[in-house]
Image (cartoon, helix red, strand yellow):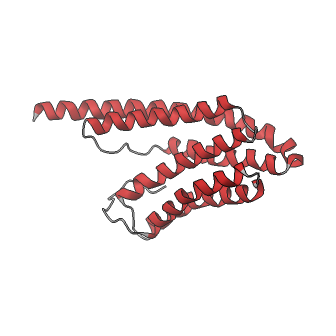
Amino acid sequence: MADSLEASSKIVTLANAVSVVRLLAIPVFLWLVINDRLLVAFILLVAAVLTDFVDGMIARRMNEITKLGQFLDPFADRLFIAATVIALAIQDVVPWWFVVAVMLRDALLGIGGLVMSRHGAGTLPVKWWGKVATFAMLFVLPLFLLGAVFPEVGVVTNPIAWVLAVVTVIIYWLVGFSYLFDAIAIARRATREGADS
């Protein structure tokens, strides 16, 4: 997750390529889950989670923080999270209410983005607790899948995963509302500045 400082307009960078690979892995992951190849799906999911840290680290160390990367990285995160909760529900690992709880929050962020774009405002500043919420979700979901791959391990990991999941969803929603309120405030400020000019 690259910081939003002095983002360039470059498109072709190593960090962006890593984000694109993560996006391309989503349909492969879903295919693996649908075809009950859960071990390979688990390995792919863990690899995808690791790339989430790799692309941000590469962008900072190589000074390749880009506007495209600022969009691609969180977009890939949200899409992979959505795909994973759907995959887990298909496998009856998590109930569908959990899918709705996670995806409605991302819909909330989407509304915030539309509000901002309508008023010509820029992107929302990244919050540290937003990063924590995303990291927690990317940790909990593979833990659920691990329990599905190895049921004997799931006896231990699933209760832990559920405690973490409930806490994570609460944080996820709190961050979502915070971003939405920020988007409304930024849009109002942009409207006032436009009226003044």
Total number of numbered labels?
0
**Residue 192 in picture, x, y percent from top left:** 19, 30
Whether residue 136 appears in this view of the structure is no
Q: Is residue 166 left or right of residue 121?
A: right
Q: In the depicted view, which residue is nearer to us: 33 or 69?
A: 33
Q: Residue at x 26, y 29 (%)?
A: 188
| Quarter containing the C terminus | top left
**Residue 170 in picture, x, y percent from top left:** 60, 30
**Residue 196 in picture, x, y percent from top left:** 11, 32
Q: Residue at x 76, y 51 (%)?
A: 36
**The residue positioned farthest toward the right in the image shown:** 152
**Residue 194 in picture, x, y percent from top left:** 15, 34
Whether 184 is drawn above or below 72: the answer is: above
Q: Dividing the picture into quarters, in which one does residue 99 lie?
A: top right
Q: Dividing the picture into quarters, in which one does residue 109 lie?
A: top left
Whether residue 123 appears in this view of the structure is yes
Q: Residue at x 28, y 33 (%)?
A: 187
Q: Residue at x 58, y 54 (%)?
A: 26
Q: In the depicted view, which residue is nearer to us: 41 or 120?
A: 41
**The residue positioned farthest toward the left in the image shown:** 197
Q: Is residue 184 left or right of residue 40?
A: left
Whether 163 is drawn above or below 57: the answer is: above
